[in-house]
Amino acid sequence: MAAIDASNKTFDALINTDFAVADFHAYHCGGCVALAPFYNAQSNDLPLINYIKVNTDDYPEIAERHQVTGLPTLIYFRNGREVFREGGYMERDRLDQNIARLLYGKEEEHG
Amino acid sequence: MKSHVVKLFDYQALELPEELRHWRVSNGDVQAQLELIARNHAIVIEREAAEQFDCVRCQISGGTFGPGSVTLVYPGRGLCPALEETCTGIRVGEQRTATLDGATVELNALRIVCMEPAPIDDLLIRAEGIDGVQTVDEYRVWWKAQEEDKRRYEQGARGAFYVMEQLEKGSEFQVDPEELEEALRAEAKRTAALYEQLPEEMRMTVEEAAEELRPDWEARFTAKLLRDELVERLRTKPMEQVLEDGKTIYIERNLIPPETVEQMVQINPDGARETFLEFAVLEYLRTRFTDGKLEV
């Protein structure tokens, strides 16, 4: 299932589930453009995780509220709470490692 | 200036090597794209028992998992092989035990789902919302044309870099040692001035900057001679326009906000000028490729 574009109205509802990931990106961001195919492919492979995209040009308020200071930034949520985040371009292997950390990581990250 | 290009490598009939010439879109590529859209519009289907690549939502306890924890297991995806192996074949409501990092964990399957790609039909294509594209056949034609344009652009861009590499390798230069050193000192001064704005521990003196630049300075110097020579030979517009075009391409290619580029021009006008000229030359060469052949 393709990643969902979030807006100010939908973002909180989208993260308020077992597991969610939000990709904060922008038009003028080469790393974001390069990351997108890997992120989209992972979203197609892993149902029941909400994959969200936040265009920070269109919705800077969400980025500000979540203190996103660089792009791209991926924030991993469990039950609506941030578990961890990682910034910068990454490929599928790294995305898979992050999802494994979200699903099976340390106790303090289980929420 | 005593330094100059003595002989320009004969690049006009250059052909791209085979590995840089792929831009055609095959029927297989089009089909793969349609299948990707179908996966993007996949629907979640409930299952009774888990097969490879399904998703098992389960309650999990033991090890590092506290009571009431819920997780997702994806058999065959390689995210957590121990749990995936345990969950293969599990049925909704079934409990199983796994060993994870030496600890025993209990799993109870709450829900099992798989993703079923949407059928590839006209309805799927209409959901994409592309102006004038309503059917699968129309999409095939539309996407093929789009993708070939994109690949031709990329091939031209790769070709331009290839031509510049060949020019740098195959041209002959006369390099005046004094001019070479003078240009190095000027660049070192610029670099040291830029570092002035950084925290003290990161700053460098002109001497230190010169030593950093020295190892590949001659290559950079001759590349600049080459670029200036090409601009003079090829340009059909005033230099201001060439620079403006180079700036536009630089912004487009690097996805840099225009205001950041303006700051770059203010901080280091000479460096920015060199960058814009480089992009102007590369763009000129890119647009001269047809089917892997350069036509200048």
Image: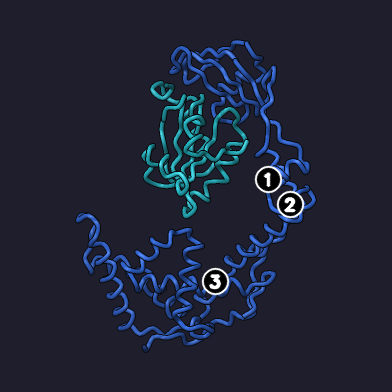
Chain colours: A cyan, B blue
Image spot of residue B26 (x, y percent): 75, 55
Q: Quadrant of residue B166?
A: bottom right
Q: Are marks 1 and 2 on the same chain?
A: yes
Q: Quadrant of residue A45?
A: top right
Report how far apart the C-alphas of labels 1 and 2 lie in the structure: 9 Å
Provide residue B54's location: percent of width, then percent of height: 65, 26
Decide: is A55 above or below B17.
above
Farthest-out residue, front: A9
Viewer-closest of B94 and A53: A53
Position in image of residue A34 (x %, y %): 53, 50
Instruction: Say which residue label 3 marks.
Output: B283
The three-letter amino acid code for the residue at tag 1 is Glu
Mark 1 neighbour density, 10 Å: few (under 14) some (14–19) many (20 or more) = few
Q: Are marks 1 and 3 on the same chain?
A: yes
Taking the view exactly as shown, the residue that stands out farthest to the right is: B137
Give whichever of discs 1 and 3 has the lower sequence position: 1
Residue at x 52%, y 41% (from the top left corner): A53
In which chain is the residue bearing label 2? B
Identify the residue under disc 1.
B128
Q: Is label 3 in a helix, a strand or a loop? A: helix
Mark 3, other Cα within 10 Å: few <14 / some 14–19 / many ≥20: some
Give the mark toward the camera: 1 or 3: 1
Same chain under badges 3 and 2? The reply is yes
Q: Along the line of sight, which residue is nearer the eye, A8 or B239?
A: A8
Q: Which residue matches tag 2?
A: B133
Please, what secondary structure does the residue beneath circle 1 have?
loop
Going by the image, does B133 lie left or right of B234? right
